[in-house]
Amino acid sequence: MSELDPVKLMKQEVGRAAAARVQSNTVIGLGTGSTTAFAIQFIGERLKSGELSNIKGIPTSFQASVLAKQHGIPLTTLDEADEIALAIDGADEVDSQFNLIKGGGAAHTREKIVDGLAKEFIVVVDSSKLVDKLGSTFPLPVEVLPMAVTPVTKALEALGGKPELRMGIKKDGPVITDQGNMVLDVTFSGIDNPAELERTINNIPGVLENGLFVGVATEVLVGEVKDGQASVRNL
Ligand code: 5RP
């Protein structure tokens, strides 16, 4: 029996499965969050054991960059890399069409750039992230320029959302993203048309990016646990 709680166990095993998909001589997109952290750890272990070689990572956040360095994964940039073979990233919600809500770690702007450029984008989630309709369990993160927080809040309310400024934990005041912006977490009671809402929100002046990822993921790996035994399935 593992010492990890069931959710951590699912995240670990799905991270391991995604790390196993990385091939030598490729550039990979390194996502953000606790599930991807396991994938980064296992990619590092494969590199150290010699099973993998000549890998370069493009981090989607400060967190991903710190973890990659910690686990010995060399980094590169979008200016230097010709192509990203594979991106591995988590999600906060996944629907049956592989559409996602991301941004629980406030990293969705860089994640959308890197994940969207990758030839393959594998999403790694535990089974609690699967939903029938996006927006049913998780608010939609919207990254906003600080000077535009008030007008963007009003515009999101006019769209039927309930925006809340994301506040720091163990830091007074709002969360500041890696780009120096703020995040509004917008509750919609279910999103009927994710593609349309993604475009509409990104058209509000002052919005940098929202956490709807429509048609970006190519594969979803889901970690599950039963009687203390973890398994991974392809959605
Ligand atoms: C960060 C993200 C994360 O991938 C998402 O929040 C899932 O995180 P976790 O794997 O910790 O559940 O979008 O912006």
Image: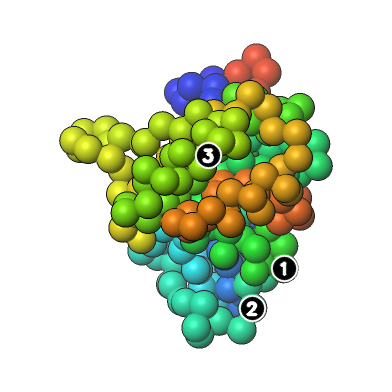
Question: Which label is found at residue 167?
Answer: none
Please state which of residues 222 and 208 is positioned toward the viewer in this rendering. 208
- Answer whether residue 155 is visible to the viewer in this image: yes
- Alpha-carbon span between mark 2 and mark 1: 8 Å
Q: Earlier in the sequence, mark 3 or mark 1?
A: 1
Label 1 element class: loop
Question: Which label is found at residue 119?
Answer: 1
Residue 28 at x, y = what percent? 58, 67
Label 2 element class: loop
Residue drawn where x is 61% and y is 60% of the image: 115
Q: Residues within 10 Å of mark 3 (few under 14, many from 20)?
A: many
Please state which of residues 129 and 231 is positioned toward the viewer in this rendering. 129
- Residue that badge 3 annotates: 156
Mark nearest the camera among 2 and 3 is 3
Residue drawn where x is 22% and y is 38% of the image: 173
Residue drawn where x is 72% and y is 68% of the image: 119
**Amino acid at the residue labelled 3:** Leu
**Amino acid at the residue labelled 1:** Lys
**Which quadrant holds the C terminus?**
top right
Please state which of residues 164 and 214 is positioned toward the viewer in this rendering. 164
- Alpha-carbon span between mark 2 and mark 3: 35 Å
Question: Cβ–Cβ below 8 Å for labels 2 and 1?
Answer: yes
Q: Is mark 3 within 8 Å of ligand 1?
A: no
Question: Cβ–Cβ below 8 Å for labels 2 and 3?
Answer: no
Q: Earlier in the sequence, mark 2 or mark 1?
A: 2
**Colour style of the rendered protein structure:** rainbow
Residue 31 at x, y = what percent? 52, 54
Left or right for 98, reference 140: right
Question: Which label is found at residue 83?
Answer: 2
Residue 25 at x, y = what percent? 61, 78
